[in-house]
Image: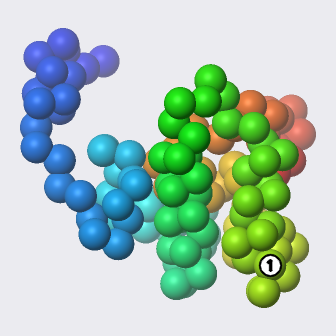
Amino acid sequence: MLHVSTDINRLVRESVIDPDFPHAPLEWTRDEAMEIAREEGLKLTEDHWEAIRALQTYYAHHADDTAINLRDLHDALDEHFHQKGGLKYLYTLFPGGPIAQSCRLAGLKAPFMASDPSFGSVA
């Protein structure tokens, strides 16, 4: 467990914003995403990064919502990737679920019901 002083230092430390990921969570880094991808057997392509950016942007624009609506997020990603096949295409990029797995890579908390511990990824 981290000491309180460590948490405070993290909060007051000046964050470095990646210009390619302006809506990324403060503690998120590309290196961290690449490490998670490696552990999950993914080789990140530009389409993976585009999905991560789309998720981070969606979450940033819905930061005031009490909860992220899974259906709305599905629809937004389906529309964003419509030219490439929508959600079907995203399942090829993220076999662990286009929402659950990509949220892990994006440093975001997946919406309620995106995964079921007894079943696995459902989104």
| Outermost top residue | 4
* Residue 7: % across, % down: 20, 22
Secondary structure under the numbered disc 1 in the rendered image: helix
**Viewer-closest of 113 and 35:** 113
* Residue 101: % across, % down: 66, 55
Counting other residues with Cα less than 10 Å from the Cα at mark 1, is it few (<14), some (14-19), or many (20 or more)?
Answer: some
The image quadrant of residue 13 is top left
Which residue is labeled 1 in the image? 82
* Residue 41: % across, % down: 61, 70
**Can residue 92 be seen in the rendering of this structure?**
no
Is residue 3 depicted above or below 84 in this figure? above
Q: Residue at x 35, y 72 (%)?
A: 20
Left or right, 107 with respect to 25, comes to right
Left or right, 83 with respect to 50, comes to right
**Can residue 48 be seen in the rendering of this structure?**
yes
Q: How is the image coloured?
A: rainbow
Tally of marks: 1
Q: Residue at x 78, y 86 (%)?
A: 83
Left or right, 30 with respect to 33, comes to left
Q: Residue at x 59, y 81 (%)?
A: 47
Is residue 17 depicted above or below 6 in this figure? below
**Viewer-closest of 41 and 50:** 50
**Viewer-closest of 51 and 2:** 51
* Residue 60: % across, % down: 48, 46
The image quadrant of residue 102 is bottom right
Q: Residue at x 38, y 46 (%)?
A: 25
- Quadrant the N terminus occupies: top left
Is residue 44 depicted above or below 10 in this figure? below
Q: Amino acid at mark 1?
A: His
